Amino acid sequence: MCPPGYGARRWAASAAGVAAAGPGMTTLRSVAARIARNIRCVAIAYIVVQVVIWHSFYAAGPWRLAGPAAAVAWAMAMVSYLRRRWPVWPVAGIDSGFHVALALSAGWCVPPAMRGDAANWLFIVMSGQFFLPAWFAPTVVSVPLALASASSYWASATMTLGTGSAGSSPGASAALLLAIAAANLCARRMFYRRVTGADVALARADLDAREQYVVLSRNIERREHERLLHDTVLNTLTALARAGSTDAAEVVGRCRRDVTLMEYVLSDPCDSAEGAGRAYGGLVTAMEAIAIEMRARGLAVHIDVADGVPAGAGAAGGDTARAGAGGGPAVPVAIVVAVAHAVREALANVVSHARTGEAWVDVSPAPGGELAEPGGLQVTVRDAGAGFDPARVDPARLGLRRSIIERVADQGGRASVRSAPGEGTVVSLCWTAWPHPDQNAVAHVTSGRAGLTW
């Protein structure tokens, strides 16, 4: 599920061996660019301080300010560049080339007592510029650049070394520059290797999650098809096999309803324009259609819709309907369809097993839980029939387990069945809205059978 981009700033191929930066590499390079910018700011401040300290040297020859001024101007340009974008290796190469030229031509701009020393402004500027090529250029480019920078500083210090700088050692300063460059390269290699490994592990985990999601989605779809087969074709064939099922018109009507329902479920779920005109687009509309079907089978169904039922439950619509006057959350169509099918199966069980001619369906807002917002949807199907003992239900029977409980659980809801011999049956279906839409999407896939009860 990796997004197509990790932001506006994407990185091309790098020496770390990654074709495109993952989240870890993107973060590391962002931090490196910020550090490079801060190093340039420190170098600017150090140059200004040294010019102030050695003001007599620069006052004696104003042309000597050309070197520090050029270094400050270039550093400010690089700070401005790093604020707008992250550097690519050609920019790092140009930056190093400028500093090589600066080192070769600005040796006379350093006070004689500081020439060749590791504390003059030119040394600080040269040591600070190593960070950019070390972290943002390939190794085959950054190593020659580091050698060229150290050599140019050593050559400049050697050529301009005067009598007042007898204690300075250009060779030691050049060696220190090489050590700084080597430390940057080693740090870059270590961090890049670890971050690349983390990005690869994240991509692998993400791929595994996508594969598991596909498998889970297919299993949910397969189970839904099995439920539909049980709820439609098997129930119709059972009715035909019973004695007294000789009304041809009723049989034809049931078969037509079964075909319509199968066509609805097997059609493209992404076609919102087609879905807007379906009878199952709104829960209450679906309830009324189911009630008409059950009345034809001899069961009187009373539907009671409470005030404040969330949008999407009462009228056909697209993927989700708009929130109602109460401001409740919209109910996804997947929830509406699952609940409608579960209600149909519960009423079909009343017709087949309850030995009663009356049932009640109550639709109301679901109470908010610990993590859920008040709103949601709760549907209760109850009858005063013969009832049954849930503990004695044959596990091979799929009506309650798959067509009601698992069907609602697969869409992130909860279902429970309460019954006892002679006391009727109550089937409760509940879906609660989460504070954020993304959490609803997760609940749609992963919500659990931990909430299934009898």
Image: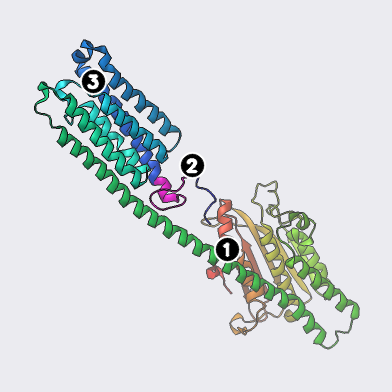
Q: Within the magenta stretch, is there residue 200?
A: no
**Which of label 3 and label 2 is nearer to you?**
3
Is residue 64 depicted above or below 154 in this figure? above
Secondary structure state at the residue bearing disc 3: helix
Crowdedness of circle 2 by 10 Å Cα count: few (<14), some, many (20+)?
A: few
The picture quadrant where one finds residue 358 is bottom right
**Residue at left offset 28%, top offset 21%:** 67
Mark 3 and mark 2: span between their CA atoms? 39 Å
x, y (%) of residue 122?
Answer: 24, 27
Please name the amino acid that badge 1 sits on. Val
**Which of label 3 and label 1 is nearer to you?**
3
Q: Which mark is residue 121?
A: none
**Side of 108 relative to 349 (left or right):** left
x, y (%) of residue 115?
Answer: 17, 25
- Residue that badge 2 annotates: 9
Secondary structure state at the residue bearing disc 1: helix
Nearer-the-camera pick, 244 or 120: 120
- Residue that badge 1 annotates: 445
Of labels 3 and 2, earlier in sequence is 2
The magenta span reads 7-27
**Residue at left offset 41%, top offset 34%:** 82
